[in-house]
Image: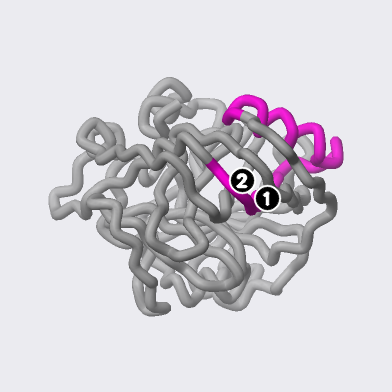
Amino acid sequence: MTRDLIDDRLIGALHLRAMDRSAFANDSELSHTAFQVGTLNALMDGHFGGDATVGELLAHGDLGIGTIQHLDGEMIIVDGVAHVVDGSGNVHSVTNDVRTPFAVVCRFDPVAHTELSGPHDLAALHQHLDDLAPRHLSVLAIRVTGEFSDLRLRSVHGQRHPYPSLTEVTKHQTEWAVNSATGTVVGFRFPDAVAGVDVPGHHYHFISDDRTVGGHVLDITLLDGVAQVDGGDDLHVELPADVSLGDPSLADRAAIKAAEGG
């Protein structure tokens, strides 16, 4: 694997390892480690084709979020099964041969959990999860199951060559409101120091238990549920040949916030 290693950095307490597809496919399955395909910067620049497959991604984790080739919707992975919510709000299962330009997963093994009785709006949910997380964790993986209200979700339609930037795509995103739903919020919290490699701060997707509602979370209120967190200090990233890890210190945080709906 060493000869296929592209970059190996220590950013604060976070160990960031980048490698090519071959090395990623043979990377060890590790607990408390996040595995990622592509980078946010590449996605922002319109790299929507994808390199690794969803099957290769799922070999490294059973919980995660991302998108699929051509930016054709918002992907959510729960219990090792991948679904995508398309630009019309329809939920579909994702086969292992579909490629992904950007996604992150982990082998979810909670290190802390708590029952939450609300209502808790999105800001309060952020705070509860931050308080629940052990202080030393650089990367936090999040799963919240329960009853939700006032959901505001979004997705995007698939793109064609020549691909536009992510910022341009999200100007035309589809948003919808859901009064109430029972389901699962999945997400990650990454430190600001890796902005551009991933989304800094909290980033959530939602899927209902009946798999009819889902999308990227713009707003949500937790009424009653269980929050679980996992995490660690390791992020392993698969990079296509035409994508570099870049310099997180140069990331355009305003553009990221606009694209993510913050």
Residue 141: which numbered mark, if any?
A: 1
Left or right: where does residue 38 sit relative to residue 188? left
Residue 188: which numbered mark, if any?
A: 2
Q: Does residue 159 belong to the magenta stretch?
A: no
Location of residue 79 by image quarter: bottom right
Foreground residue, 126 or 203? Answer: 126
Mark 2 touches mark 1? (CB < 8 Å): yes
In the depicted structure, whether residue 3 falls above or below residue 250 = below
Residue plotted at (36% across, 55% down)? 242
Dot 2 or dot 1, earlier in sequence: 1
> Which percent across, then down, holds residue 248?
55, 33
> Which percent across, then down, holds residue 217?
46, 40
Q: Secondary structure at mark 1?
A: strand
Please, what is the three-letter code of the amino acid marked with disc 1? Answer: Ala
> Which percent across, then down, holds residue 186?
58, 51
Around disc 1, counting alpha carbons within 10 Å, would you say few (fewer than 14), some (14 to 19), or many (20 or more)? Answer: many
Residue plotted at (65% across, 68% down)? 2
Residue plotted at (72% across, 52% down)? 234
**Can residue 49 be spotted in the picture?**
no
Left or right: where does residue 166 sit relative to residue 238? left
Left or right: where does residue 256 sit relative to residue 88? right
> Which percent across, then down, holds residue 33?
71, 58
**How much space separates mark 2 and mark 1, taking CA atoms?**
5 Å
In the depicted structure, whether residue 157 falls above or below residue 2 = above
Residue 223: which numbered mark, if any?
A: none
Foreground residue, 140 or 224? Answer: 224
